[in-house]
Image (cartoon, helix red, strand yellow):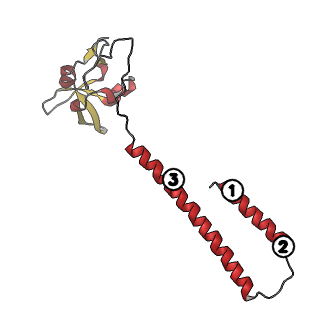
Amino acid sequence: MSRRFIAAVLAASTAIAAFSAAPARAATEEDIARLLAGAATIFIIGKAIQNARDDDDDDDRRKVVTRHDPKPKVYHHQSSPPKLVPRGKPHRDRAAALPAGCVRQIEGGRVNRVIMGRCLERNNISVRSLPKACRMNVETRRGTARAYALPCLRHRGYTLARY
């Protein structure tokens, strides 16, 4: 049952109670029995409505969970299927040139040259597209900074832009 129906029933009962107002008198046992019977009836109707709503919600959940299509959907396109590009490698058709101004020489470790991540971001290059395997942290005068090993990037197809 809807909320509008319940609101209409409550409004009607309030209106009837207002019209049938009688002068104040002491309540008898019969009046108390009628009052308790009315309250019990309203309580039972409310519980029935609540249970019906709960059952409807459970049915909807079961339908969603158990629903499946027996046949897989096949989409037919006029154009050729999309080309697969290996993850972590740049697309071969576009130039994967990184700015040479972001290259820094570092000392210690196996890597001598790195490309600084902050510099790439300033040059509008998303560092999220760079391979995580090449990422490393380097110590600078201002603390630790993110950098990418140049040999690792070159191995994955990236080049340096010439300006």
Where residue 5 is drawn, which disc sits there? 1
Q: Residue at x 38, y 22 (%)?
A: 123
Residue 143, image x, y percentages: 29, 40
> Which residue ends up furthest to the left in the rendered image?
110
Q: Position of residue 18 (x, y in %)?
A: 83, 70
- Image mark for residue 20: 2
N-terminal label among 2 and 3 = 2
Q: Residue 14, image x and y in percent?
A: 77, 67
Near mark 2 (Cα within 10 A), the count class, few <14, some 14-19 or many ≥20, is: few
- Of residues 107 and 153, the one nearer the viewer is 153
- Is 138 located above or below residue 12 in the figure? above
CA neighbours of label 1 inside 10 A, class few (<14), some (14 to 19), many (20+): few
* Sooner in the amino-acid sequence: mark 3 or mark 1: 1
Question: Which label sits on residue 57?
Answer: none
Taking the spot 31% from the left edge, 38% from the top edge, the residue there is 142
Q: Is residue 98 above or below residue 16?
A: above
Task: Please name the residue shown 38% across and 21% down the image.
Answer: 75
What kind of element bears circle 1? helix
Q: In which image quadrant can residue 36 be found?
A: bottom right
Residue 5 in the image, given as x and y percentages of width and height: 68, 56
Which quadrant: the C terminus? Answer: top left
Q: Quadrant of the N terminus?
A: bottom right
Front-most of residues 46 and 70: 70
The residue where tag 3 is placed is 56
